[in-house]
Image (spheres, rainbow, N blue to C red):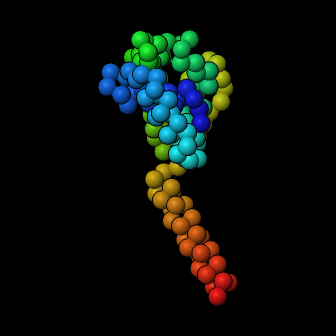
Amino acid sequence: MNFQVTVLKVLVSYPDGFAVMDDLKRDMALLATSGRDWADRTRRLAARVPDLDIFSQGLVVRESGGWKITDEGRAVLEFMEARPAAGQIVEVFPAESADVTIPALPLPAERARRRRERRERRLEAAERARAAAS
């Protein structure tokens, strides 16, 4: 799990982008234990901004017992979450700091096909296990 991306995602979900530390810790613990999907997602988002530092870049500020996301933080989060067109290569931000490109996410039809294939493999494996057990 990428801590800084998670902080941005949690803060943006609160009214005015402000959360007290207890709420922030609780939400982050919930996401951290939610499984591999969240960790993979935050890793993908963080790859779009390789030198992310939410405090030194002014994306999050500390305020009376909590943290608040700034307008710059919202803009960076929107940039990280922007979906590229199909087949488009995405440049990382900031462009001058890295020469790395990330391919676009698979098309929804491709993802659906892979999901269906995984489900079918699981069902076949369960059927084989039942057959072997009897």
Question: Residue 60, relative to residue 102: is it above or below?
Answer: above
Query: Which residue is pictured at 58% across the width and 69% down the height?
Result: 122
Question: Residue 132, relative to residue 102: is it above or below?
Answer: below
Q: Can residue 77 be seen in this snapshot?
A: no
Q: On the image, which quarter does residue 114 sit in?
A: bottom right
Q: In front: 84, or 15?
A: 15
Query: Which residue is pictured at 40% across the width and 23% down the height?
Result: 19
Image coordinates for residue 78, horizontal then vertical, percent? 43, 28
Using residue 57 as the reference point, say whether residue 50 is left or right of it.
right
Q: Residue furthest bottom?
A: 134
Query: Which residue is pictured at 38% across the width and 21% down the height?
Result: 18
Query: Which residue is pictured at 46% across the width and 23% down the height?
Result: 21
Question: Residue 133, relative to residue 17: is it above or below?
Answer: below
Image coordinates for residue 100, horizontal then vertical, percent? 65, 30
Using residue 134 as the reference point, say whether residue 54 is left or right of it.
left
Q: On the image, which quarter does residue 117 sit in?
A: bottom right
Q: In front: 73, or 98?
A: 73
Instruction: Pick the quarter of the image with the N terminus.
Output: top right
Image coordinates for residue 3, horizontal then vertical, percent? 57, 29
